[in-house]
Amino acid sequence: MIFLQEKVFFDGPFGKICGVLHKVDDKKEIAIVVHGFRSNKETGAKNVSEELNKIGINALRIDLDNMGESELDFLTKVNIPNYIKQIEASMDYCKGLGYENISLIGTSYGGLAVFAVALSHPEIKRLVLRAPVVDYKELSLKEYGKEKLAEFKEQGFVEYYSGAGDLYKVTFDYIKSCYPYSMYERAKDVAIPTLIIQGDKDEDVDPLAAKRAVKCFPNAKLHTVKGAGHNLGVNGNFSEAHKVLVDFFK
C-alpha cells in the first residue's frame, strides 16, 4: 500500500485551489474532504483523511477559501454557490488524475456545501455529512434573531468575532445564498447513499435538525454520538465518529 501526502495546487474559478492529496492505493476511488466555516484543510479534515487512508481510501482535503491557502477571498466571496464551484473544480481535478468513483465528506457549513453539490451530481458515490448545517435560515434565525438579521441585511455584512477575538465582516450573501439549499426541502432529490454523523451535545447546530433531516433523504442513515459536541469528540476522543465513518466506506 502506498502512503503519500502531497500538497497540490490546481485551477479553480477564483484562482488556485490548494489541497493535500492522500494517495494510499491505486484504486480509482477517492473522497474529497471539506472543512467547515472559518476552518481549513489542516483541522478535522486532516484527521478524517488519515482515518480513510487506514482502510485504503484515497483522499483529497481542500481549502475552500483563503482561511487556508486557496485564493477565494473569505470576506467577500464566501457563500454556498461559490463553494459549490470550488468543490466541482476539485472533482474535475480528481477525474483528471484518473479517479472514477468520488465521494464527498463535509463538516458543518462544509456539510451544507457538499449536500448542495450532490443535488446536481448524482454520480457521487457516497455522501457524508458531519454535524451538518441542515437549514441555514432556521439556524441563523435561532442564532441572531429576526431584528439582527434585518440589520445585517441592511448593512450588507455580518459581524462576528473569531476565537482569538478578531472582528470579521463577511458579506451578508453568505447567509442569504444558503436559503435555497435546505435539506428539509431538497434532500428528497439526493438518492446517493448518505451518512449523517451528529453529536447530541452540539451547541453550534441543533442536533434535532439532523434527526428531522435524515427522514427527508431516500437513502440515508443517522449516527448520533452521545456526549459529543460539534467536533464529534467525547472528551477529546473521536474514535466513535471515525469508526462509523470508516464502516460506511467499508
Image (cartoon, helix red, strand yellow):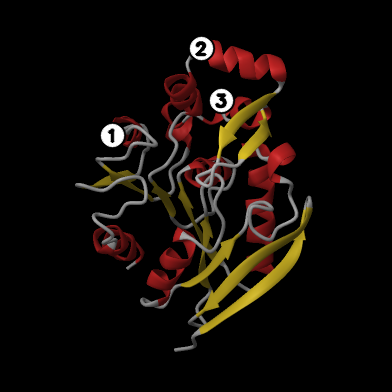
Which quarter of the rendering shows the C terminus? bottom left
Left/right of residue 15 with respect to residue 165 in the rendered view: right
Q: Which residue is mark 1?
A: 211
Q: Which residue is mark 3?
A: 179
Image height check: is 89 above or below 212? below
> Contact (CB < 8 A) between labels 2 and 3?
no
Mark 1, other Cα within 10 Å: few <14 / some 14–19 / many ≥20? some
- Percent across and percent down for residue 229 are 30, 45
| Residue 56, picture quadrant | bottom left
SS assignment at label 2: helix
Mark 3, other Cα within 10 Å: few <14 / some 14–19 / many ≥20? some
Give the mark nearest the N terminus, 2 or 3: 2
Left/right of residue 221 with respect to residue 109 in the rendered view: left
Give the mark nearest the N terminus, 1 or 3: 3
- Percent across and percent down for residue 179 are 56, 25
Which residue is at 51% across, 48% downward?
A: 36
Residue 177 in sight here: no
Image height check: is 153 above or below 92? above
Return the residue nearer the eye: 80 or 221: 80
Which quarter of the rendering shows the N terminus? bottom left
Return the residue nearer the eye: 101 or 213: 213
Return the residue nearer the eye: 6 or 249: 6
SS assignment at label 3: helix
Report the disc number at residue 146: 2
The amino acid type of the residue labelled 2 equals Lys
Left/right of residue 78 with respect to residue 181 in the rendered view: right
SS assignment at label 1: helix
> Contact (CB < 8 A) between labels 1 and 2?
no
